[in-house]
Every structure is written in structure tokens, then in C-alpha cells.
Image: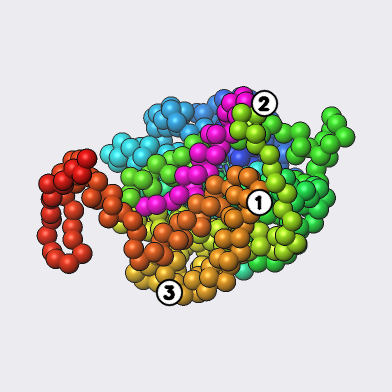
Amino acid sequence: MDTPVYDFGMIGLGVMGRNLLLNMADHGFAVSGYDKDPAKASLLESAATPGTKVKGAASLAEFVAGLKTPRRVMMLVPAGPIVDAVTNELLPLLEKDDIIIDGGNSHFTDTQRRLNALQDKQVHFIGMGVSGGEKGARFGPSIMPGGDVSAWKALQPILEAVSAKVDGSPCVAYMGNGAAGHYVKMVHNGIEYATMQLISEVYDLLKRGCGFSNDALHEIFKQWNEGELRSYLIEITRDIFLQPDEFSKERLLDMIVDRAGSKGTGKWTAQDAMDLGIPVPTIDVAVSMRDLSFYAEERKQAAILYKHVVRPVTDKQFTKQVHDALYCSILLCYAQGIAQLQKASVDLKMDIPVADVIRIWRGGCIIRSSILDLILPLLKKDKTATHLLLHKKVAQQIRKRTPALRKVVRQAVASRIPASATLSALSYLESFSSEKLPVNLIQAQRDYFGAHTYQRTDREGTFHTNWQSAG
Ligand code: 6PG
């Protein structure tokens, strides 16, 4: 057997795995990849930049034998049982101190289970979120590793080299204990779902409400992307409006069926937020709206049954209001996601460095946006995990734009255009900033029918009342 020469190995040479390896190779690392499909190994080698060291291994044994020790082996395979199957195949071939990295979108509880199972094996395990899609993987993703600190140290130089950079700072950092890497990536995706839902509502308001063409929408998003809404999702939306269709004379966007798929990470975010007792209503709504989009036949029938007709928007200032409403609601989404991270950090003992999370989300990932530049310095200074909405600078930005957010919600209702995420962001703000909420009534009802007890405003203790029926 030849002496091992490869610095890093990848199992799973799909779009993400291949591009991340090519990125590493371009940064001077010798890399090797393995995939059950030999065609993918050939594709990897043929796509390599001339002069770089890239190998597509023919078997798992050859792949492992070619890696320098301690071996750094990353999996980019579909989340779920395949991760366990690959890990089990790998284990007999690995030695003490080798590192296995799961770079897929695994559920954080699976990652924790795998970490526990590997504890006695003397092999390190890192659960790592990678964001940025195909281009990100090739030219600089945002990378979210968590778990074993010594393994992170061994990976740090290579991950820093290949990650995206913002002002020279790499978009990778240690995200905390246990499954923190996958937890942070999950919340990233929850925010991704919410932001995409908000943008789609804005699209609907401007298209069906104002009657703007794709060209006009392109111009609006172009302008927005040059200002304070600058972000990856606004940028790609700008481009989507112009994409021609190869089969018809229409724009491609108008030929796409209105059913939004999902692989589950947004739902997991909402589910775990509920377990933690952290409200993330805009993420919840975003998941529900993707689900609702699949009721195409029912929607068609209901449109007739309920005589759903859109009323045009006439307000000339509306586009500007929509801009401000979108800024405000995206900021409110980040606030929800950050609150979830702060709580998970403590309750799940992950010790997540939330300011570092925001720092590495500023480049490479899907939710990168200039709004994060406002948030970062506040979190850096904040040692007590204060809710983002309680920071004066955030309050200033939100207060400036809430009149526009209210107007947009009113207009959406008047125009009969659904805007659930936008509305949820506003309601979240209104509830969060309500000194009093009407849930005293809920407590009274609970005590009435179930003797669940309540607390009083004027004295300590727990009370129960034998409520009198007036009927
Ligand atoms: C990223 C993305 C990515 C995710 C897709 C699809 O950060 O690069 O979050 O990891 O898999 O966006 O997610 P859905 O299919 O659930 O929309």
C-alpha cells in the first residue's frame, strides 16, 4: 500500500460533496472522495482544477488507506439512516483519534445519539452544518461545526481556508457542545424558511396587488439589494424575475407550480422551539404555508366557493412601505431564531456562542444579509443573552418601520392577499411589547373547567376558585 497522501476525505460525491472537495483542493489540500456510484468519482477527478491533488477512490478501503492520520473523513450523504450505515461501514477501518464529520442536515438529536454511541470508540465525531448551496460549497460556504473541541482544532485550518470570508474573517467557528453545529444549522434553516415566506408574500402583494410585471419586480428587488435589504435571498429573487423559460415565451417563474417542497429542517426548528417554550411564530407560519400550498385541488374549489377576488392596491407609496415592512419582519425573524439559540444554549447545555453564529452567518450562507451587521455588535457586547428586541438600536430600527408594517398588513387584508408571515411578525412584535396580555382570561377558563389554578396580581400564592355558573 502506498503512503497515505490525502489531507481530507469525503464520502458522498453529490453536488455539495464534490464542490466542497474541489474548493479544498483549490486551497492547496490534497483531497480524496468516495461514492458508491463510480461515475461520481470520475466526475470529481475531471472537474478538478489542473495542478490540484484530487482523487476519486474506487473503494472505501482504498479511500481510507489513502488518508493521512489522524484521518479527517466527512460525510455529505442524505440525513437519516444512511449516516448511520456509512458510519458503521467506516468504523472498522478507522483508528484512534480519526475524525468523522457529518456535514449533512441531520436532526440534532440523531447527532447527539451518534456522539454518545461513539464515545467509547476513541474516534471523534463532529456534527457540522454547511450552508450556501452548490456555489457556496465551491467558493466559500458558511460552516457550523460543533461537538468535540479537539477535533474542531484539528479541522480549523482547512475549514477556515475554504469558508466564505467577510472583511477577511472566516465564516466558520466552533458552535458549541454536542450537537450544537446541527442545532445552529437547523435554526438557520428555520430563519431561511421564514424569510423566503416573507419574500413570497411581498412578491404576491406587488404582483397581484399592484400589478407589477416581472421586469418591474426585478427593478424593485435590484434597488432593494443595493440598500439596507441587501441579502442573498433578495439578490437571487431579483435574478429569478428575469429568467426566461426554455419551453414557452413566459418567464420561468410563471411556469413553476405553486407547491413548495421541504426536507424538514424548518419543521424541526418550529418543533424544537415549542419544546423549549420559545415562540417563533413566523417560522411556524412559514412551515404551515408550505404545507398549505400542497392543497392545490382544495384551493381551486375554495377560490370559487369563497369568491376569492384580489382587490388592487392603489396607494402610490406602497412599494416603499413594503420595503420597510420586509426589513422589519426579517429583523423580527432573526430575533425569533436568536431567542431560540439563546434558550437552546442553556437548556440543551450546548453553550452556543450566539455572537459567533451571527458573525459566520454574514457570509456564504443562505440567510446572509446586511441586517446581521446591525445585530452583530449588539450580541458581541451582550453578556446576558438579552432578547434582541430589547436592544435600543434594534428597537429604533423597528419603531421607524412599524407604521409601514401595519399599513402593509392592513393593505394585504383589504386586498385579500394572504400575508400570514408578515402578519405573524407584526403580531409577535405587538405581543412581545404588550405589558399586558389577555391570557388572564385563559387562566380563568383553565381554572373554571379543570381546577388548574392561577396566580393573582395583588398577592403571592396559587389560587383556585369554585366558579359560579350564571346560566
Ligand atoms: C443551505 C440550505 C440547505 C437546504 C435547502 C433545502 O443552507 O444551504 O439550507 O441546506 O437543504 O435550502 O431545504 P428545504 O428543501 O427544506 O427547503
Residue sitting at the far right = 249
Query: Residue 39 has which mark?
Result: 2
State the CA–CA distance, disc 1 to disc 3.
34 Å
Q: Is residue 36 above or below residue 23?
A: above
Amino acid type indicated by mark 2: Ala
Residue at x 50% of width, y 51% of height: 424
Q: Position of residue 254 (x, y in %)?
A: 76, 37
Residue 40: quarter of image: top right
Disc 1 CB within 8 Å of nearest ligand 1 atom: no
From mark 1 to mark 2, how far is it between C-alphas? 43 Å
Query: Is 225 rendered above or below residue 59?
Result: below
Displayed-image quarter of ligand 1: top right
**Does label 1 or label 3 sit earlier along the sequence?**
1
Work out whether mark 1 precedes mark 2 in sequence or the reverse, and give the earlier one: 2
Q: Is residue 42 above or below residue 375?
A: above
Residue identified by numbered label 1: 202
Q: Is mark 3 within 8 Å of ligand 1?
A: no
| 300 sits left or right of 89 in the view | right
Label pair 2/3, CB-CB below 8 angstroms: no
Q: Nearer the viewer, residue 328 or 465?
A: 465
Observer-nearest of 267 and 463:
463
The reply to whether residue 387 is visible in this rendering is: yes
> What range is drawn magenta here?
278-302
Disc number placed over residue 381 in the picture, else none: 3
Give SS at disc 3: helix
Q: Position of residue 338 (x, y in %)?
A: 44, 58
The kind of residue on which mark 3 rests is Lys
Secondary structure type for disc 1: helix
